[in-house]
Amino acid sequence: MTIGFDSGSFKDPDGRVFRSGPHVFRTVTPAALDRFERLQQEGLLTALASRGWLMPTTVEPAAAFGLDPDAFGARVLRQDAVPVVSYGYEWTFSMLQDAALVTLDTLQAALERDVVLKDAPSFNILFEGTCPRLVDVLSLEPYQPGTLWAGYTQFCRSFLAPLLITAHTGAAFQPLVRAHLGELPLTEAARLLGWRRALRRGVATHVLLQSRLEQNFGQCTDDVKRATAPARYPKTVFLNTVQRMRRLVASLGAPTSSAWTGYSDCNSYSGEDRAEKARFVERVLTDVHPGVVIDLGCNTGEYSRLALRCAGHVIAVDGDAGSVDALYRAERGSTRLTPLVSDLHNPTPAQGWELRERASLLARLKGDFVLALALVHHLRISAGVPLDAVVAFLVDRAPEGIMEWVDRQDPMVQQMLRLRPDVYDDYTWSRFEQALASRAEICAIAGNERATRRLCHYKVSGRTSTRR
């Protein structure tokens, strides 16, 4: 059995992450295993998992899962895999906020048992549906009395600064964090927030001051170990600081609407047409009963929720953060729906060391069935992608799906064409049907030549899900 380690886990000296079947495993050094088992015996890990903050983790003999003990160690840590791994720059404001709160809640509960989180990157949190879980159990280690929180500035870079920027400027944090591989430098955050926002709660203390300290620290010649040596910092002060940060994070808000959040109520479908569309989609999904549905261009999730009636899990993707945030807030607590923010014309690329440290979204986005409703015309006309390439892209996402065709006579397409020269000669039903039929079997079509919108159920013969 050939198993590759996760290329993003090389930074952790305590263990490497790899996946085998439906489980995620982590190798573990003897010292880290001893620390883990001590925390397990003391009940901390069970307490954190019971509150939904920590991904349940067990110690298993490697050989029991067909793993070579010489390569992976006699014992490994095991967790269940989430349907899709996502990164902080693919989350909405509320998702990042909830992930920050789980990090702080975990830290506070751990501190009460003399344990601390040694670091705080957003990559340590994975979403099981809409539920954020801490997955890096090895980041929990014994608290040394009198020490500062080593993960504080990383928490500010990964969570607090991006949240403050969106809350106080309205700017989207996702492209900023993506550009810096998950952590926004505080000097950049300070520049964006500026001193005129210094009186806003948390800005001066956690961004402007820390930015100055980071700059000054980089210019000094003090030994790093001496600069980070234990200080007289009582645990009560530590706990109070964590509680204040939690209240700050919880108090932040962001714009809750955008140009697209009301799209499902103002499109060109009549009431009956809309009902027939829903019946067609539900009928196909009921017959197929897919494990994982990928809803591309999900908007506020009308069809994502419909798909949940028939599928095991739904991954809902849209480029409009406001729409996805509305879906996330409506589905909080669900482990069966994962919302993500990504522009399909410019999805998250592979990033980091050798462009392998963080996988691209398309490499992580795997499913059994794809919904592409009211999407083709946006990719062809707004993004300018040739129609044949749009169809190929969508067919490649899963072995089966429903694709919606919106004719150029449709009011929504007409509105789009008023904003740009009509250079889309390939945007015709016959070209679309030909492109789809050349790659898949068209199983059923809802609508006729008089309709401006048609739904195509298609299947790629002989191809199975990329999840298997």
Image: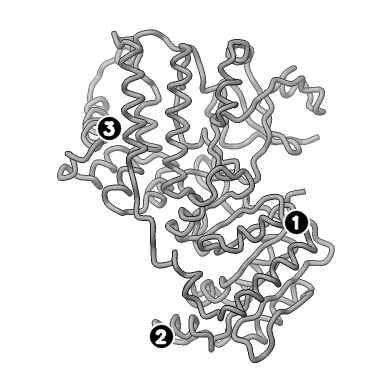
- Alpha carbons under labels 2 and 3: distance apart: 47 Å
Q: Position of residue 185 (x, y in %)?
A: 33, 39
Question: Would you call the spot at circle 2 few (<14 residues within 10 Å), some (14-19), or many (20 or more)?
Answer: few
Q: Which amino acid does label 3 sit on?
A: His
Query: Which residue occupies the extreme right position in the image?
Result: 462
Q: Callout 3: helix, strand or loop?
A: helix
Q: Is residue 396 above or below residue 124?
A: below
Towards the viewer: 225 or 344: 344
Report the mark closest to the observer, 3 or 1.
1
Q: Which badge, 1 or 2, is on the more N-terminal residue?
A: 1
Q: What residue type is labelled 2?
A: Arg
Q: Which badge, 3 or 1, is on the more N-terminal residue?
A: 3
- Alpha carbons under labels 1 and 2: distance apart: 39 Å
Question: Would you call the spot at circle 3 few (<14 residues within 10 Å), some (14-19), or many (20 or more)?
Answer: many
Q: Which amino acid does label 1 sit on?
A: Pro
Q: In this view, does 235 lie above or below 393?
A: above
Q: Please indicate whether residue 88 sits to the left or right of residue 375 in the image.
A: left
Q: Looking at the image, which residue is at 51% across and 69% down?
A: 264
Find disc 2 in the rendering and name its residue.
418
Find disc 3 in the rendering and name its residue.
206
Q: Looking at the image, which residue is at 72% across and 18% down?
A: 75
Quarter of the rendering containing residue 48: top right
Find disc 1 in the rendering and name its residue.
290
The scheme the figure's colours follow is one colour
- Alpha carbons under labels 3 and 1: distance apart: 46 Å
Towards the viewer: 42 or 189: 42
Q: Looking at the image, which residue is at 40% across and 39% down?
A: 183
Q: Where is residue 18 in the image (x, y as percent from the top left)?
A: 67, 33
Q: Position of residue 95 (x, y in %)?
A: 47, 44
